[in-house]
Image (cartoon, rainbow, N blue to C red):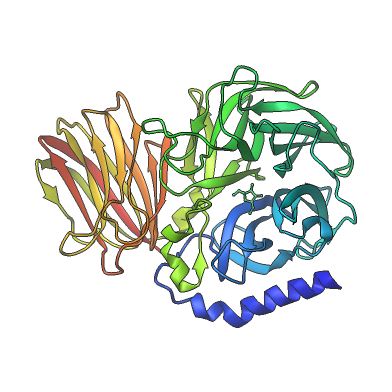
Amino acid sequence: MKRDEMLREANKYIEENRDKVKDGYYRLKYHIMPPIGWLNDPNGFVQFKGEYHLFYQFHPFSAESGLKYWGHYKSKDLIDWEELPVALAPTKCYESHGCYSGSAVDNDGEFTLLYTGNVKNDGVRSAYQILASSEDGIEFKKEDDPVIKEQPEGYTAHFRDPKVWKEGDYWYMVIGAQTIEEEGRVLLYRSKDLKSWEYINIIGGSNYNGFGYFGYMWECPDLFSLKGKDVLIFLPQGLEAKGDLYNNIYQAGYVIGNLDYNSGEYSYGEFIELDRGFDFYATQTTLDDKGRRLLIGWMGLPEEDHKYIEREEGWIHSMTIPRVLDLKNNKLIQKPIEELKELRKNHISYNDIILNNEEMNFVEVEGDVVELLVHFEEWNASSFGLKVRRSEDAKEETLIEYDSVGEKLILSRERSGRGGKGIRRVLLEDINKLKLQIFIDRSSIEIFVNEGVEVFSARIYPDKESKGISFFAKSGKVKLKKVEKWDLD
Ligand code: FRU
């Protein structure tokens, strides 16, 4: 009864109010956003009966981080997403303060979600892991009792975000945790039937197994194998900025290692940030029927709501475009999904242009919903790059610059318009070409560097007239081997 009421009320609210936000300029054209209200983490990313499903942390009733529901989209091609009714509402006592993040699996034709029920009574938190299942992938029925009722001894109730997968005869789960000493952990569980779970071991942690202090909580873990290695993604909270590293409020990154599935022992290397931009958190991956390990992230961060200007339009936050993961030289390589090429139209291209201590723009290379491929080589300039979302008077611009002396690629939104400001940098040593694939979508920019060795994601809030793009070299030359531009439709 109550389930139906809460879901009905949410769906009705969305229907009655969606028109209020739809014309906002900052709404994205090819990214997943909430129809109205608040979005955060991607959840339950899975392919089921040939279709991709993506759920998300959703508070439909305002552009604030309120009580969490699960919103739901599905797609045949990761491009056209169909909005489905809200999938989960926090109806049960074990989730009274929100249906928190979790994952989905196809259990032999039964679409199964595992997620965290968040409860806060008189300021005291508890966390329950909950199973819900569905045959049609639209309506979900929750188990009466949580499948994991509490965290192991020695842990706080910051115990959440189960990510589940199958390996051999067992289902495995990694889950984010915090010790009572306030150190982040990822724990491993195992189950035969998704319902009765056995705790196996600590996969990794802050001040654990020689790793050193690395934050007070690790959220949204995700463990998967790629090219014979086991990659663990997690979100450490509580790191201090260190030069160009860890400059956002919380981080999203990974380690590469080997997991012994029997003992649950995991040995791994250094932590590497997944994204070098300003707005990136809470990723989730899935393996699709093409054998691709796909990743999607929240193009936003917790606790920085005021930086996201679309709040004024009655909605907030979006996902990144989906990325395909690969492993090379002990590093994850991230590329935009090929499917995005279907959106390309109005191709413009320029080749072999030398920029010599000057700034240039090209006819028809401009826009606010575009993809750019920019290929620089043969430089002696001390720095070079491009400026996008430029206003006519050049007072507004988003700067992408390679400092060839410091060997750093820089993204500056100091003059991007409204919203968050600042500069992010990443070291790119010993390179002799710089290839940038840039996706601009109204209030976002994603930059894939040198075939996916680095990515920068950011939200930006320029004026809607600021559509200019220019290219420059300082103190020397650079060859613009190629500039290609498409409008994305
Ligand atoms: C990450 C997170 C998760 C939690 C969810 C709540 O952004 O804090 O750990 O499940 O958001 O919305």
The percent position of residue 320, horizontal first and vertical second, equals 50, 52
> Within the image, what quadrant is residue 82 found in?
bottom right
Q: Is residue 45 left or right of residue 335?
A: right
Residue 280 left/right relative to 474: right
Quadrant into which the N terminus falls = bottom right
The residue sitting at 51% across, 42% down in the picture is: 250
Quarter of the image holding residue 211? Answer: top right
Q: Residue most toward the front?
A: 122
| Residue 224 drawn at (x, y percent) | 66, 34
Q: Is residue 489 visible?
A: no
Is 467 placed left or right of 167 in the picture?
Answer: left
* Vertical order, 155 against 137 (above or below): above
Residue closest to the eye, 310 or 237 = 237
Q: Position of residue 14 (x, y in %)?
A: 62, 76
Q: For residue 179, which quarter of the picture?
A: top right
Residue at the far top in the pictured view: 210
Q: Is residue 352 visible?
A: yes
* Number of marks in picture: 0
Q: Is residue 143 left or right of residue 226?
A: right
Residue that appears at 15% across and 63% down: 393
Give 479 or 177, whichever is nearer the viewer.
177
Image quadrant containing the C terminus: bottom left
Q: Residue at coordinates 64% horizontally, 22% vertically from top-left?
A: 208
Residue 226 locus on image (x, y percent): 61, 30
